[in-house]
Image (cartoon, helix red, strand yellow):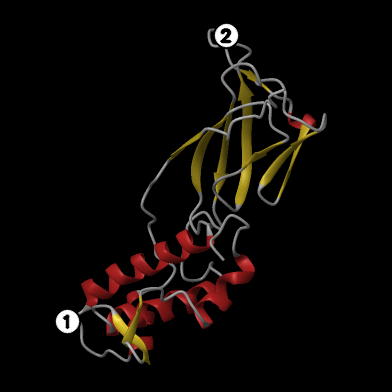
Amino acid sequence: MQRLTESVPLQYITVSEVEPTYEPVTVTEAKNYLKVDDSTDDTLIAQLIKTSRRMIETHANIKFHRRSITQKQTGGLETLDAMRLPIHAVSSITYAKDFDSTPETIDASKYRFVHDRFFHEAGRFVEGRFADGYVITYTAGLVADATPSTLNNDFKTAILRILAFLYENRQEYAQGWNEQGFSINYDIMKGEINRIINPYASAKGIF
């Protein structure tokens, strides 16, 4: 007899992406860290600050700036997984009983959110199981606008470390030597930078 198994959850995410007013590190802070005195590379340094911040967000699966998230996930699951972290506030979880019906909202008292998952009081999300799944709307991110004064200093340190590497190394670099020749390392998140941001990383991150 063939065992029936549920398919892997199908998800889509739409994000209200608005470029932040501020970056967590200023050009002046970056130049002080890099020991750069002139303004020749100011534009490049500003670009590398943004790149470094995005690399950390992607690597640790967290967001510095709060933004609106709409996430769809198929139904019949024990938990619903938040795909952007950290969550600041949940607006609603809705479902449709069938494809033509108006979406209904699950009462907030029936579920709770722990770290990166939503749990239903019934032990399983069943309302939208045989229909079009669930739509979760929430805001995710550490702060409303990550000014240099609001972001954790560990993140600022990690941004500066990555920035320094990108500024000084304009191409791939040789990390080690063996009998066959140099080995090339493309991952600058290894070592100390990894250890700095590891305590804040989501379970869905790549650590």
Q: What element carries label 2?
A: loop
- Label 2: few (<14), some or many (≥20) within 10 Å? few
- Of 8 and 24, the residue lying toward us: 8
- Label 1: few (<14), some or many (≥20) within 10 Å? few
Q: Would you say 171 lies left or right of 151 here?
A: left
Residue 163 x/y as whole percent? 36, 77
- Tell me the amino acid under the disc marked 2: Ser
| Snapshot quadrant of residue 168 | bottom left
Q: Would you say 195 lies left or right of 107 here?
A: left
The residue that disc 2 covers is 101
Q: Is mark 1 on a helix, strand or loop?
A: loop
The residue that disc 1 covers is 40
Residue 146 in view here:
no
> Who comes first in sequence, dot 2 or dot 1?
1
Q: Is residue 169 above or below residue 104?
A: below
State the CA–CA distance, disc 2 to disc 1: 60 Å
Residue 73 x/y as whole percent? 57, 31
Residue 141 x/y as whole percent? 54, 53
Quarter of the picture containing the N terminus is: top right
Callout 2 touching callout 1 (CB < 8 Å) = no
Numbered badge on residue 158: none
Q: Which residue is drawn at 74% across and 25% down?
A: 107
